[in-house]
Every structure is written in C-alpha cells, then in structure tokens.
Image (cartoon, rainbow, N blue to C red):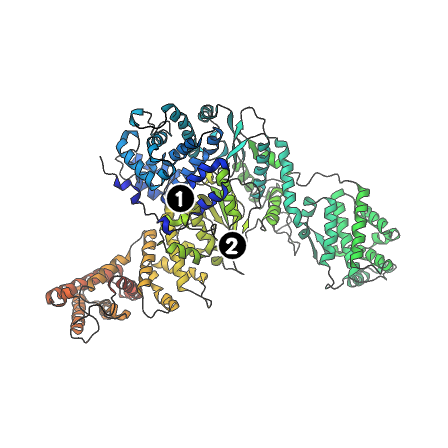
C-alpha cells in the first residue's frame, strides 16, 4: 500500500489541548445548548468539535488565494490552460474554513434530524458521518489523482481510523461502528465519492436499509453546507426529494429575504417576519444576513406580511422613545425641537417633552433673557411704544415664553393650523384673550419669539407667586386641554413611509427580484454630475423622500453647500440614524474613536450557532493586546492555536468583564446573520493609530475564533448585504498607514491568515516591548515608526534590541531576547516572502565562529571578526581590488587570532582548529571571501556608503544569531 503518512494528523502542528484553553466557540455552545433534544449535539461539540477547530480552522474548504491555488495544482499533469482554469475557479470560490464547513454541515441538517425523530444512536451516526464526510479535503494538501473513497479502500480505512482517533470521534461513538459511519460518510454525495457497494463494508452493525435511510440526512447536511449562500438557495427539486424521504413530505422549504441591508432597520424587518413565521409554525433553520430559510409544514398558511410594517414601526418607536428628550434643546433664539420629535412621538408625548425639557434646560443657574430682549424690540420698533411693557423679566417668564413658542410649533406641525389659531387656543386657556391683538403686532425679529415673551411676562405679572414647579404644572395641565379641543391629528402614523419601503425590499420565497444597483448608480450620476433636480440621499444615494439636514449649532446645512443642492438624508437613513442613536449609542457618520466590525457568517448561522453568536456579541468585553500576546506567545505564535485564543474574554470572570464591556453593538432582538460591533478606543482623544490598533488585530482573529467573515471600517453602514457578496474572509477598509507599511495587505483570504496572524503579533509585540511610557504601558503610536522601519528592511527587528534591553534593565543582549527577536524575524520573513538577509548573516557568523569565539558577553567581543572585516572595507580606498581587500581582511584576522592565542585579546579559539594552523588559515580565508562576496558585493552592491548605512542592522542581526547559537557561560571552555 502506498505510504500516506504525510496525510496523517501528525503532519499538522496543533497545540496540546492539555496545555491550552478551551476554544471560546465550544464554551459558547455548551453555555447555550440546554435543550434536552440537543444533548447528543452537545456531547459532539464537547468531545469532537475542539479538535475540528484545532486541525481545520485555517484549512480551506472552498475558495483560496491565488498562491495557494497555484500550489494545489502544481503536481497536475495537465495543459497550462486547464491548470489556469482550475486556479481561477478556486480563487473565485468564496472563503470558508473546513472547520466551519463541517459545523455548518452538522448543524445545517440538525433541525431535520430532530424533525425526523432519529434516536440517540442514529443522531450519533449522523454527527459522526458529517465529521468524516469530507475526508478528501482533510487529508489532501494538493489536488491530484489520489482519492480517499471506496476506490482506494485500504488507504481510506487507514486515514479514516487515524483521523477518527485524532478527532476523538471514537470517544463520541464506539469504534465498533466505524464501518457504518464510513458508509454514511462515503455516500454523503450522490456523485463524487459515492460507494454503495456493501461488500466494501463487511462489518456493518446496522442493517443496510436503515443505513440508507440515514444517508438522506447526511446528504441533506452536505448539500446545505455546499450550496446555501442565500435564503432561497435550497428551494430546488433535489431538496424536495430528500424531504419526502426523511420526513415524509410533511415539510417544504420556504424563505424570506431582503434585497438590501441597512443595519438595525433590516434586523427589525427580519425579526418581524420571524415572529409572523413562528405563528404559522414555520421552523427557522438557516439564518443569513439577507434573510431566513424555514421548514414550513406542507399545508401551512403564509406569514401575515401585512403586520410587518406596524411591527417594525413599533420596534422603532420603542427604541427611540427613551431618547425624545434629547430632541429638545436650547439655542440662541430659545427652546428648539428637532423634526425627528414629530416623527417619533405622538402630540401628547411631544408637548409634554417640550414642557419638561424647558424647565430642565432653563435652570436657576441661567441668566434671564426676557429683559434684554424686551429692550431690544422696543428700541428697534418704536411704533410698539404704546404697548404695556411693564412685566417681570425673570427666569419664570423665560420658561413660559420659550415653552409656549415650542408648543405652538408642535401643534402647527401636528395639526397644520396657522400660528394665530394656535395662539388663540393658548391665550383662551391662560385667560389672556385680551392680549391677542398685541401678540399679533409684535414681530418675530430674527426668529426670536418676542410676542411670546410679551404674553408670558403679562401672565407672570398676574401670577407673581407661582414657583417653578407650579408654573410647570400649569403648562402640563393647560396644553392637554387644548389638545383635547383639537382632537386627534389627521396624519399618518409615525414612520408611515416604512410600509412602502418594506414592500420594496422584502420578499417571501420564490422571488427573483434583485436590488437594481445600475438604476441607483445612474440616478446618482444624473443628480451629481448633470445637476438634475431629483433629490438623492447623501448616505445611501437612494431616491426615497429626502430631508435637508442642519447643524445642531449653526443651523447651517451639513449635507450641501448651496441652496440649489438637492442632497440631504433620506427618510430611511433617518430611521436607521435614530435606531443607531438610541439603540446602540452611535450614528451613521464615522466616529473618530470607533472602528466597526461588520460580522457575517460563513455562510450561515443555524438556530444553535445564532444563539452562540448572540451570547458572544452580548457579552463582548475589551481585551488588551498584552493579555492576548501573553497567551499566544506561550504557544510560540502557532496559528493553529488561534481558535483557542479568547479575544472576546468569553470564558473569563464576568464581573471583571463588566468593567470592560465597552462596545457599540446592536440592540437586543432575535439574531439573524449580520451583526455590527463597534470597538471604541479605551481612552481619550485617540490618534488614528490608537483607534485602529486593537480593532485591526481583532479583525484578523475574529474569523478564526468565531467562524465568521468580516469587514473592518470606520463606516457604520453595512458595506455588503451578505457575506456571500465578497469571497475574501477579511476586508480592512481605511486602516491607518502603519498597517500598510507593516502588513502591506488589507484584504485576506483564509489561507493567508496562517502567516498574517503571527506576523501582526510579532509587529505589535516588538512595538509594545520597545516603546513604553512612564507607567510602563505600550506606546501604540510608535507602531508607525516600527512598521515604516520594517518596510525598509525586516532586519530592523534587531534594531529594537537596545530599547528592549533598556526597558527590561538587561546589560547585554540576553539569550531570551535574542531568541525572541529571531523568532519575530522568522515569522515576518515567512509572511513577507522576500529576500532573507539573515541567511547571509547566519552563514557569515557560522564561518567566523569556526576560528573565533567570545569569552564574555560584550557585543564588541561577539562581533570582533565581523567588525574587523567591515572596518577594513570602510577604511579602504574606493579603487581597492577584491583580492587586495580579501588579503587585508585575512591579515587583520590572523593578527586577531594570534592575539587571542597569546592571551593579549579576550576570546578563545574552538578546539577543532586551535592546534591546526592550516585549518585556521582556511577558515579565515573562507570567512573573508564570504564576507566580501555576500555582504559587501551582493547585499551592499559594492558601495561603501550602503555598507555604512546597513552596518548597524547587520551587527544587531549577527549578535542575536551569535547569542542564540554560540553564547556560552563563563564556566564553559576558554582558551588554555
């Protein structure tokens, strides 16, 4: 039998689970799966799934980078054109890790397993088969002719049993059932890998007919994991046949979908549909960012979509009503309310809010403005001198005047009455009717409500004993009486326009309607480039009803620069803006201190994984880099350890996490497939580097830790409707330039993370150790310096040795630091895939270590031969020949060795060359020639200026390598 040891688990560098933490994804699952029906699934997650994460979180199940695709196909004996076609196909497939693929396959069919009434053993068969159904992908690092199915039974058996052992599968289901499991796994696909030949399975434990019944459940799970990218992907005939055979045709597959993703508003739509679907017994089993897939009873009714708009409006009102007070403010002209108040509150709540906020804003610490305004209006309009201007100019008058002015505006907005009619109602209620003609004569000069100051003054003259509380009660009693007289406003309910919007974006099963991006783009160009008159939204570029936005402070337009501009913010974005403000303390505009992670499943969540993710997002707490680095460094930055790295502090002390639960996340509600998580900087006035540094590193870790795809951006608006809209695993949008220098890439395929994650930890750790403030905290702004240096040469890793030595109070370069810096360097050079100057340094140091070693710990002693060679070259004349330079270096080195032998110079000569002059001479000649060839003429291009420029980097790299390889303790052998 062909040797397949290279296919086995030992070929994977996985961490020792006994010396590492439990994967947070496993902890989340065990904390959420409390249903008795999920006991077998819980057991599988506890026993098997941690090892699936260890082995397969960084292994591609679908798409891959160009470099990896090229490596996968390099052994194929096919024409170049066909190879390129295969490469392009692999590159264009969407990313998904094999760990997530296996989880999706197992859980994607789990609801069907429960509907099918499988007993405990059958459930174990199902989960075990899903674990092993993609053995080809597990064992094959390259595409080729090797097949791990029935045609290669002996190889398959060996791999199957050994991988079952590695994944602890035989602790979940007894090994005696392995052939039954293998039969199910090999028949998970109708075509590729199918093996229904019972002779290949001589030791089956179940009758073949029972196994064939289970095959359909396994095929369903595999199909779901392979083809489900959007909610309606499963509505096809092959699925109908499987449902007929598994659950007797009692269920069919249905779905709902939105054709765009606004964020919280879209979440509210999905939640409303889910509630209606539950009422008709539709069972949600796949959650996508753009909708949900259901098992629907065959004869069930459709959800009542007519109730969706009202549910979404009520959800919106519930979220924003707690913030109506913030929609009332005081500016230079008095109490003002924002138009949003009319949209989110009924007239009673709005007027009450105006009154209470008026008395809250105009506190006793304020200076009354009534007197100054009275003097101004009298001076400016002399014809008003016949009016009675004698009234109190105190804070009570300010409060009453500004409150009445605000109420007048509100009643005008709600009822459409003119101001005179409203004033008559108010004056009648306050028994000030005889002042109506005076009120009409006083102008509103520059927007200041002078007429209301006049009337309020006269009311306070009549009621001078009213204190603040009593006056507030007068207003709270008077205004409802007016509203009762006016009756219910004849206006649509709040957010009535959502009815039309929801009808446009929501479809339930079978619809092929797509968002018309071309029409939206054409409309944008018509409005922006050709200055057409149709208004467009400054945020989403839609043609929904546009409202101009004005600054809270200057009252100037904030979305346009001229009166002719038709740009503003549409009503839909205004709703989303309100939801963000009151649902997650955020806005639609980018914030300086917050970076948003747009999280998408790869490719879907199930009811079980949705619960897991909800717990993760709800309990998110900031973790520091130092905490993560300590855990990760202990594993030597092994990327396979990342699934066990708890970036969200899921398994840590909840009381401690409460202190650090700083985030901007979605409001509570039923989970669907998209989540927005804002990571603010834990400090004041962050620089761009400080705002990005933790968000960027979490962007690289989250896809592996939680099996998601993501976009990291300052933009709080979803960049994509679904994770299926982009093939990559990570997109980092608008990151600071330190990242571009240090990491160079902002888009990552899954396979690229294996080297990218250790690389970013190396850069961050180097910075954190080299630059510390007075409190011994890392100075993250220095990431710019470190990354720019590394962009110049990766040898700059060793440049920071002196700073780290000083911070750690080490006199000379210690062994631990040398090893650490070399480790950082090796990680970075593997990531950068460029020239490796340390290869030159290693060779040079090895060559001079053959004839000289330092007896102490001083850097100059460790580097003596190298320093001698460099000095000779730098002190030589430019026209000196290579042969002459070599002879000059050899002469100085012979003198150095003689000085050591005569004990005139510190150091010692290795025993193997100490007594052999010819051997020493040969070693010196070899070093001299190699130094000139590799360092001077190759690396420095024969330019003394370049050697002078690189000299310190070469020295630092050489010292680190020497310390790691040749450093000896004082009691070790020295020259006799």
Expressed as whole percent of the image width and height from the top left, the position of residue 181 reads 36, 32
The answer to whether 702 appears left or right of 55 in the picture is right
Expressed as whole percent of the image width and height from the top left, the position of residue 461 reads 86, 60
Expressed as whole percent of the image width and height from the top left, the position of residue 894 reads 16, 70
Q: Residues within 10 Å of mark 2 (few under 14, many from 20)?
A: some
Q: Residue furthest bottom?
A: 904
Q: Secondary structure at mark 2?
A: helix
Would you identify the image quadrant in which residue 11 lies?
Answer: top left
Disc marking residue 50 = 1
Disc marking residue 308 = none
Disc marking residue 657 = 2
Q: Is residue 431 above or below residue 893?
A: above
Along the line of sight, which residue is nearer the eye, 904 or 469? 469
Question: Is the N terminus in the top left, top right, bottom left or bottom right quadrant?
Answer: top left
Q: Residues within 10 Å of mark 1 (few under 14, many from 20)?
A: many
The answer to whether 68 appears left or right of 416 in the picture is left
Query: Can residue 615 be seen?
Result: yes
């Amino acid at each position: 039998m062909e040797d397949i040891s290279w296919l086995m688990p030992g070929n994977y560098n996985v961490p020792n689970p006994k010396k590492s933490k439990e994967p947070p994804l496993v902890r989340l699952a065990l904390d959420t799966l409390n249903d008795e029906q999920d006991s077998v699934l819980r057991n599988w997650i506890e026993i098997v799934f941690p090892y699936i994460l260890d082995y397969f979180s960084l292994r591609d199940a679908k798409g891959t980078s160009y470099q990896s695709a090229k490596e996968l196909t390099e052994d194929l004996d096919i024409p170049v054109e066909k190879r390129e076609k295969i490469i392009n196909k692999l590159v264009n497939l969407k990313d998904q890790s094999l760990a997530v693929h296996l989880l999706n396959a197992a859980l994607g069919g789990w609801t069907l397993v429960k509907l099918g009434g499988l007993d405990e053993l059958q459930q174990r068969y199902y989960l075990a088969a899903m674990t092993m159904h993609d053995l080809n992908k597990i064992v094959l690092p390259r595409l080729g002719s090797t097949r791990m199915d029935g045609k290669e039974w002996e190889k398959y058996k060996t791999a199957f049993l050994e991988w079952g052992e590695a994944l602890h599968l035989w602790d979940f289901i007894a090994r005696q059932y392995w052939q039954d499991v293998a039969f199910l796994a090999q028949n998970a696909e109708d075509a590729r890998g199918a093996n229904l030949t019972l002779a290949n399975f001589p030791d089956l434990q179940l009758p073949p007919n029972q196994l064939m019944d289970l095959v359909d459940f396994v095929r369903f799970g595999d199909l779901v994991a392979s083809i489900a990218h959007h909610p309606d992907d499963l509505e096809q005939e092959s699925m109908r046949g499987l449902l007929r055979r598994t659950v007797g045709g009692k269920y069919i597959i249905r779905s709902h979908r939105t054709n765009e993703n606004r964020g919280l508003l879209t979440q509210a739509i999905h939640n409303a549909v889910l509630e209606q679907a539950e009422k008709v017994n539709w069972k949600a089993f796949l959650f996508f960012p753009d909708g949900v897939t259901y098992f629907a009873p065959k004869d069930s009714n459709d959800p009542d979509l007519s109730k969706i708009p009202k549910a979404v409006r009520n959800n919106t009102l519930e979220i924003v009503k707690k913030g109506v007070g913030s929609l009332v403010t005081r500016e230079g002209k008095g109490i003002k309310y924002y138009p949003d108040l009319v949209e989110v509150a009924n007239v009673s709540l709005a007027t009450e809010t105006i009154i209470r906020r008026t008395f809250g804003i105009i506190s006793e610490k304020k200076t009354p403005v009534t007197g100054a305004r009275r003097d101004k209006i009298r001076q400016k309009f002399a014809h008003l001198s016949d009016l009675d201007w004698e009234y109190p100019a105190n804070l009570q008058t300010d409060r009453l005047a500004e409150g009445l002015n605000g109420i007048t505006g509100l009643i005008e907005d709600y009822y459409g009455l003119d101001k005179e009619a409203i004033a008559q109602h108010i004056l009648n209620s306050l028994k000030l009717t005889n002042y109506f003609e005076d009120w009409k004569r006083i102008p509103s000069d520059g927007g200041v409500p002078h007429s209301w100051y006049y009337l309020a003054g006269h009311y306070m003259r009549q009621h001078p004993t009213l204190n603040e509380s009593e006056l507030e009660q007068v207003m709270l009693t008077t205004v409802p009486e007016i509203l009762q007289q006016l009756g219910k406003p004849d206006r649509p309910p709040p957010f009535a326009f959502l009815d039309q919007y929801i009808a446009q974006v929501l479809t339930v099963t079978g619809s092929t309607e797509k968002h018309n991006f071309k029409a939206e783009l054409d409309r944008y160009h018509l409005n922006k480039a050709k200055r057409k008159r149709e208004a467009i939204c400054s945020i989403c570029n839609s043609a929904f009803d546009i409202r101009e936005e004005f600054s809270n402070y200057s009252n100037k337009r904030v979305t346009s620069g001229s009166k002719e501009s038709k740009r503003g913010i549409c009503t839909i974005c205004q709703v989303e803006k309100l939801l963000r403000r009151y649902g997650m303390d955020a806005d639609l505009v980018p914030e300086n201190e917050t970076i948003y992670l747009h999280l998408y499943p790869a490719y879907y969540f199930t009811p079980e994984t949705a619960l897991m993710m909800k717990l993760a997002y709800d309990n998110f707490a900031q973790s520091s880099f130092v905490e993560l680095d300590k855990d990760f460094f202990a594993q030597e930055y092994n990327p396979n350890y990342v699934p066990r790295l708890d970036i969200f502090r899921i398994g840590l002390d909840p009381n401690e996490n409460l202190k650090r639960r700083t985030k901007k996340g979605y409001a509570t509600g039923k989970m669907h497939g998209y989540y927005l998580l804002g990571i603010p900087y834990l400090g004041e006035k962050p620089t761009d580097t400080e705002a990005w540094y933790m968000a960027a590193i979490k962007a690289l870790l989250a896809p592996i830790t939680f099996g998601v795809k993501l976009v990291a951006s300052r933009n709080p608006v979803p960049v994509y409707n679904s994770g299926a809209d982009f093939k990559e695993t990570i997109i980092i949008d608008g990151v600071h330039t330190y990242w571009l220098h240090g990491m160079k890439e902002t888009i990552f395929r899954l396979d690229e993370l294996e080297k990218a994650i250790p690389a970013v930890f190396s850069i961050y750790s180097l910075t954190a150790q080299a630059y510390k403030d007075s409190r011994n905290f890392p100075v993250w702004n220095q990431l710019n310096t470190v990354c720019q240096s590394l962009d110049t040469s990766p040898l700059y890793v060793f440049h920071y040795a002196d700073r780290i030595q000083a911070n750690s109070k080490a006199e000379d370069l210690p062994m631990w630091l040398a090893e650490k810096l070399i480790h950082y360097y090796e990680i970075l050079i593997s990531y950068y895939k460029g020239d490796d100057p340390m290869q030159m340094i290693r060779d040079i140091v090895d060559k001079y270590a053959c004839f000289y070693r330092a007896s102490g710990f001083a850097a100059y002693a460790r580097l003596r031969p190298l320093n001698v060679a460099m000095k000779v070259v730098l002190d030589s004349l430019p026209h000196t020949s290579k042969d002459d330079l070599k002879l000059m270096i050899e002469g100085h080195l012979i003198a150095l060795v003689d000085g050591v032998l005569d004990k005139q110079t510190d150091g010692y000569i290795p025993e193997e060359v100490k007594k052999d002059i010819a051997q020493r001479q040969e070693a010196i000649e070899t070093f001299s020639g190699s130094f000139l060839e590799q360092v001077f003429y190759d690396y420095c291009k024969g330019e003394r200026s370049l050697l002078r420029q690189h000299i310190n980097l070469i020295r630092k790299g050489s010292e680190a390598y020497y310390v790691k390889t040749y450093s000896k303790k004082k009691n070790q052998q020295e020259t006799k």
